[in-house]
Image (cartoon, grey):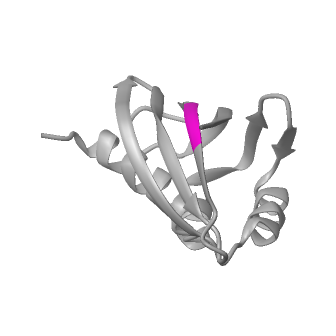
Amino acid sequence: METNIQAFFRAFNEAFVYQDNETILESVTDDIVWRMVGIDTIKGKENLEQALGEMNSTDHFDLEIEHLITHGKEAAVNGMIHATKKDGEQKHYSFCDIYKLNKHKDGKIKEIISYVLEVQ
C-alpha cells in the first residue's frame, strides 16, 4: 500500500508523461530548480511553465515505475518511459529522478535532478 507521499510522487510522474502541466505546476515551489543532467537546468516556476509548453507533444507515452522510495523530505523514482511517435516509431527511456521537498508534511517539490537515457 502506498503512502500519501508515494502517491504524490506517482501522480507527479504521471503528470509529466501525460502532459498535465497544471498538476506539475501545482506540485512545485516558485523557486523550483530542475537539473536535467547533461542537458539543462531550469530555475523558477515561470521558466518551468515555459519549458513544459515547449515539451508538449502528440506522441503517446507510457510510464513504468520500477522503484519509488521516500524518506523525509527526499524521494527517488526510477523506471521506464515508452514513447510511440505518430509514425509508429517507438523509443524507450530509462529514468531516475531525485526530489527534494520544501517541507516534510504537505511539501512541494523544490529540487529535481533527472537522469534520462535512451535504451534499445
Q: Is residue 89 above or below residue 91?
A: below
The majority secondary structure of the magenta stretch comes to: strand
Residue 109 pos. (x, y %): 57, 43
- Is residue 98 rendered magenta in the image? no
The magenta region covers 93-97
- Is residue 96 rendered magenta in the image? yes
Q: For residue 99, which quarter of the picture?
A: top right
Q: Residue at image x 82%, y 68%?
A: 54
Residue 106 pos. (x, y %): 40, 46
Q: Give the total of numbered labels.
A: 0
Does residue 110 appear left or right of residue 104 in this picture? right
Residue 1 pos. (x, y %): 12, 40
Q: Residue at image x 36%, y 34%?
A: 66
Q: For residue 11, which quarter of the picture?
A: bottom left
Residue 84 pos. (x, y %): 57, 65
Q: Is residue 88 above or below residue 10?
A: below
Q: For residue 93, which quarter of the picture?
A: top right
Q: Residue at image x 51%, y 68%?
A: 18
Q: Residue at image x 77%, y 34%?
A: 35
Does residue 106 appear left or right of residue 91 in this picture? left
Could you say which is closer to the camera, residue 106 or residue 49? 49
Q: Residue furthest left?
A: 1
Could you say which is closer to the camera, residue 107 or residue 71? 71
Does residue 12 appear left or right of residue 6 in this picture? right
